[in-house]
Amino acid sequence: MRKLILTALLITTTVMVSRAQQSNRKVQLAILFDTSNSMDGLIDQAKSRIWSIVNEVSTLTYNGRTPSIEIAIYQYGNDGLEMSQNYIQQVVPLTSDLDDISQKLFGLRTNGGSEFCGAVIGKSLSDLKWSNSPLDLKMIYIAGNESFSQGPVDYKKECKKAAAKGIFINTIFCGNYDTGVQLFWKDGATCSEGDYFNIDSDRQVVQIDTPYDKDIMQYNDSLNGTYYGYGSLGMEKKAMQSAQDGNAMSESINVAAERTVAKSRSGVYKNSSWDLLDASDDENFKISEVKEEELPEEFKGKTTAEKKVLIEQKKVERQIYQKRIAELAKDRQAFIDVEMKKLAGVDKVDDFGTSVNKSIQTRAKEIGFETE
């Protein structure tokens, strides 16, 4: 009898591990921005690179599946924040709502202040809903230019907490490499086995326009046409989608194309809270339960069966646009790769985005992810 029980327990454990390995894995990124007066260039670089970072994550796969991505943003070192909170603010918690991330990022403003790296790392560790799975990639990125050891919280203690949770702290010093080492930014990374980078935050991000950008942007309009907002969030979120398209375009057509590519990846750009098509992927969603007045115009006055047929038709339409954008994105990336190799032989192109992308690729491979 005991042998049978042990055998049953072994089978159950094996099944649980197998299910955990097959379930969708996560990439969780917490980005901690120094928003003191000297950091306008850093924020500008982040605005230009946020969609590149999202696309970098979307190239990762595990057992053929793309991981879900969650991003959180904190700001610190800003006199406009509460002194009682060590001049720290959670701008947005870990979320998969990429439009919300973009909106909050573009809303950041700099102001003089005291930068307490240990304190903001500690807040991100305690406040955010970090995954407990060792199969998920969990990264903190903190960027700034003052001493890493400032403030009431010992960064070394927070590093130990991060390491115990399997979270890598990656530091990005805005200034000279050796100065960053002297100011403990390298130590702030290595103590959790993370990566240390230095960048010139005042340098303009290298943008490479391609022959494919305009075509991608034309398909962006078509893709947006397949999003049907419903419920209390429908109109607001649809407007936010358009506004974030505008924010990306205000940076450059290159950034706008990057955003469109990210939006074409259905496993990454999900809007189940407000879009009928994404919501219908949930087996618990029932179109019949959505009030008539909360439906988009195209769906009003139709029977439940007709609504379901229309959803499936629009899904096919969306997939066509996603596929075409993906094809253009592949050609676009090949063009960029060639141009970047030319630049690498002449000039250093490291910035906020390239630093983040490098460490994502390195750490992801270490825990079993593959890249396209």
Image (cartoon, rainbow, N blue to C red):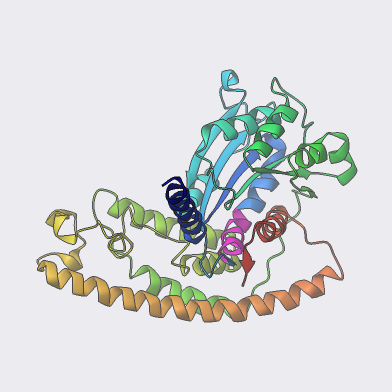
**Count of number-bearing discs:** 0
Q: Is residue 341 left or right of residue 89?
A: right
- Give the position of the C terminus as an image quadrant: bottom right
Residue 189: image x %, image y %?
Answer: 76, 41
Residue 75: image x %, image y %?
Answer: 60, 36
Type of secondary structure dominating the magenta stretch: helix
Location of residue 354 (image quadrant): bottom right
Between 304 and 168, the residue placed more toward the observer is 168
Instruction: Residue at 81%, 70% (x, y): give it.
Output: 343
Residue 44: image x %, image y %?
Answer: 64, 50
The answer to whether residue 273 is magenta is no
Asked if one can make out residue 182 in the rendered structure from this viewpoint, the answer is yes
Q: Which residues are magenta?
A: 47-58
Q: Is residue 298 left or right of residue 25?
A: left
| 291 over 263 or under it: above or below | above
| 88 over 244 or under it: above or below | above
Instruction: Residue at 69%, 47% (x, y): give it.
Output: 41
Q: Residue furthest front?
A: 1
Residue 167: image x %, image y %?
Answer: 64, 43
Q: Is residue 172 left or right of residue 83?
A: right
Location of residue 333 (image quadrant): bottom right
Instruction: Residue at 81%, 37% (x, y): give it.
Output: 187
Asked if one can make out residue 108 in the rendered structure from this viewpoint, the answer is no
Between 225 and 3, the residue placed more toward the observer is 3
